[in-house]
Image: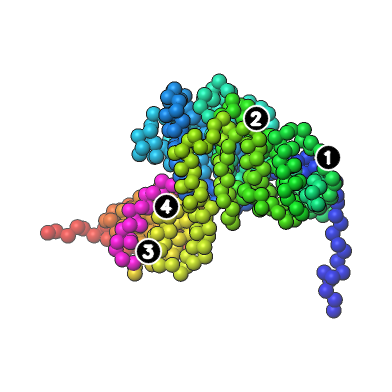
Amino acid sequence: MTDATQNAPAERKIIVEQNKRFSECMLWKLQREYFDQEGINAWVNQVPFYITSNPVIAKCYAKLILAFASEWVKKNPDAKNHPFYLLELGTGSGRFSYYVVKALDELQKAQGLTDIHFCYIMSDFTKNNIKYHETHPALLPYIEKGMIDFAIYDLEVEKPITLLRKNIRLSSEVLVNPLTVFANYIFDTVSHDSFAVHEKKLYELLLTLSTEEQNIKNGRPIVMEKISVDYSVHEAKSKYYADPAIDDILEIYKTSLNDTSFLVPIGSLRAIKLLKKLSNNKLFIISTDKGYSALESLENLGHPSIAFHGSFSMMVNFHAIANFFKNTGGDYFLQTPRKGIKTSVFCDGFQLKDFPTTALTINECLEKFSPSDYFTLHRRMSDSFPECDIDTLAAHMQLSDWDPHIFSRLSGRITSLVDEADSETIQYLANNMAKIAENYYYMPKSDCILFEIGVFFHAIKHYKSAFEYYSKALPIVGEQFGIYYNMALCLHHIDRNQEALEMFKNAKRMDAESKETDEWIAYLEKHLAEPPAVE
């Protein structure tokens, strides 16, 4: 007997493109089409984003922005009469935007700096995401008070940026204060060029894309994950970009590196040039992404790998971006090399040494204990969640700044430990459930944290609070047996039996076979029919 798979013919490969400069290959067009078609669903179990969209990293950014803005105002008193515009590139899910604005609003009030005005611009190249954000219940309070606006903006196309609500076109006249730009997980998804250095010679790596014949429709690949990428090596011409600020970077790599390959984030550099021009060379960028921040990190690398995850992404050469700012008179901060994501700061029009409070905040928030360090600890902790006691889980929730995403992973374990936990820890958790609820940013097809909070209160017999959170969860999760049944139990425990009966009947509609529901309905009907006891 033979194995049929051994005799199966090999899939025929079709060459889609051959010997193309990386930044000019079709992958970038496929990338844009993917995000445009998927809209908000791209961030539902497809494109990873949690690592740059949690309360910890958002608070780091908010502290840094407030430190910089307050220090700028001290040096330029008229700055209070003009807003500080905060432009987020490639907003995506919108969760990071919400956490930053929320943290910034809270910090301003706590520090008495409410006279500094911020306008947070959630931007994306596709209208599909903007439509979702404009009506999101978590964002609406900040939209209504004018703290959030929106813009359709494509990093790689030189077009004006117009705020959709205020109908203001950003310009050097409008941007009186420095333009702040947030670039999280965006520089890794816009165009790059690929190079290699060997024996002090510079080579460009041209791409050939191929895929199985069945993955082709109308001459184009259907699924990006099925595309094969091959490189061919060609000696690079001198003054490759005809731009001294970028060509100088290539020269540094040619003379300093030995035998390696590297990327130049050319799409990002071109976008930065436009933003520098737009802001009249007053630019402040904070970026967190996977990438390289030191020259030695670029040594002995193979040809660039492409990570496909619905879309695709590359490692960001932060070292090249830093040198670009240096070559054009700006300044930068690069996080010391460590495994994981990197957070970098770039500025134009001023030097960080002239803003000591800002520099100190950078050191405290991005170097001593960075978003990368937090995520490394969290990832290690998450491996042992099933074995942790409730005090350890509570401490981790505090470290996460009461992150709903973390609570969704811990809630089952916490609930299982409630009966053996001490009352102080239970009360500590109960007192902070409101913070988890405030941090909840709804995403399609995701767990409803309000329901999980309801389950926690239910488990500790705080039935009134449990019912309140179940009620808030109902419009989100929709009619389901479990939520109606739990709400009915809570109503019974707080002596609202007539309402409990109606809620059990709702549960019965969802599951006609539930014997427990039948028993509760019969019990309550009998109980409510009995005349009240005469004292």
Give the residue drawn at x 35%, y 57%: 429
What secondary structure is marked by label 4?
A: loop
Q: Nearer the viewer, mark 4 or mark 1?
A: 1
Work out which quarter of the rendered image holds the N terminus and state it. bottom right
**Which stretch appears magenta?**
421-445
Residue 213, x across and y down, in percent: 84, 53
| Inter-mark Cα distance, 2 to 1 | 25 Å
Give the residue drawn at x 68%, y 29%: 158
Q: Residues within 10 Å of mark 3 (few under 14, many from 20)?
A: some
Q: Are marks 2 and 1 in contact (CB under 8 Å)?
A: no
N-term-proximal mark, 4 vs 1: 1
Q: Nearer the viewer, mark 3 or mark 2?
A: 2
Name the residue tied to disc 3.
391
Q: Is residue 300 above or below residue 55?
A: below
N-term-proximal mark, 1 vs 3: 1
Callout 4 amino acid: Trp
